[in-house]
Image (cartoon, helix red, strand yellow):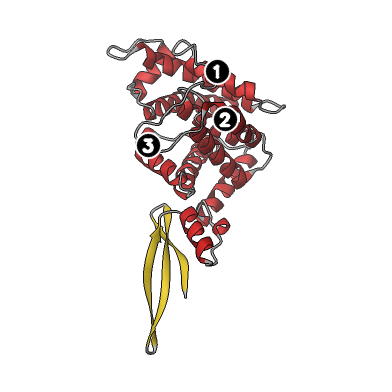
Amino acid sequence: MAFIRKRKRGNTYYYELVENVREGATVRQNVLQYFPSSKEAEEYARKAGIEFDASAESWIDESLAKTLQEKLEKLNKLRPLPLAAVKRLRDKFEVDMTYNSNAIEGNRLSLRETWLVLRKGMTICGKSMNEHLEATNHAEAIGLLEKMAGKKSEITEMDVLNLHAVMLDKISPQDAGFYRHEHVFIEGSQIKLPKWKEVPKLMQPVYLELNSKSKGLEAVYSAIKIHYDTVRVHPFVDGNGRLARLLMNLRLMRSGFPPTILRREERRSYYSALEKADKWDFRALSMLIGKDVEQALDLYLDAVG
């Protein structure tokens, strides 16, 4: 009788269709087929009448999940955090997040140059005006993000449109804060993006998720969903990746987590994880973000502990 089993490779899983074959007094297992994602394994199992519960899959390792819970609880016990430490952390996040998020999208400003643009108002020789504006706009968007995180009322569609408008201000004013009205493609990907007329409806689950009240690990999962859905709906002509990372942080911050940075050096792993998520295997993306959440918790605990 054939069955499907899960195998681990790095931060992700793959699946095998296995058949037990009896040879005398022993049983040998033959691997008949491989599935790169739980979605494909589930589809095969349904057609073949094989029991397979994809809903039981864990996006984040139990050990990491436990660590995130424990470190968040430790940070919560230290609240309210010292104002001087909070300001230092906030200033560091503004520069680091701006640099890394823009660098993932191809901005050539270095971390030091980003600091000079934001803190000293300098113009960097050899770098374009748009690259400078991407830095200053992103920093301004972080300021708006922090105000949104502190809102007592719900996050609205207009809040998100305003956040996007700030990011593209003076770069693409005709697109800033407006859903796309054309079909777009992701370069280097075969993913077919939704038609532009579907965008407003497809973004509604993102807005619902942004206002979810779940805490702890469930808030991390919620932030991951927001991030992925925003990237794959691709609601705007430009700025979708940066917006997805900001909205992910908005959800985390509203549930008590410190802001989290996906780093430039993780770019290849990040895009690979998004491709796996396209096949409904969210583990790689979840582990990547989960580890970055832990790094943010460690930074705050070291600063105020």
The quarter of the picture where residue 97 lies is top left
Q: In the orientation shown, which residue stands out farthest toward the bottom? A: 25
Residue 301, image x, y percentages: 53, 39
Residue 73 shows in this picture: no
Residue of label 2: 198
Label 2: element kind = helix
The percent position of residue 24, horizontal first and vertical second, equals 37, 89
In front here: 233 or 196? 196
User: Which residue does the image show at 60% across and 27% down from the upper left?
Assistant: 200
Cα distance in 3D space between marks 1 and 3: 25 Å
| Label number found at residue 189 | 3
2 vs 54: above or below: below
Q: Residue at x 47, y 33 (%)?
A: 193
**Type of the residue with mark 1:** Gly
Bin the neighbour count of mark 2 within 10 Å (Cα to Cα): few under 14, some 14-19, many 20 and up.
few
Residue mark closest to the camera, 1 vs 3: 3
In this rendering, the label closer to the viewer, 2 or 1: 2
Per the image, the residue denoted by label 1 is: 177
Residue type at mark 2 is Glu
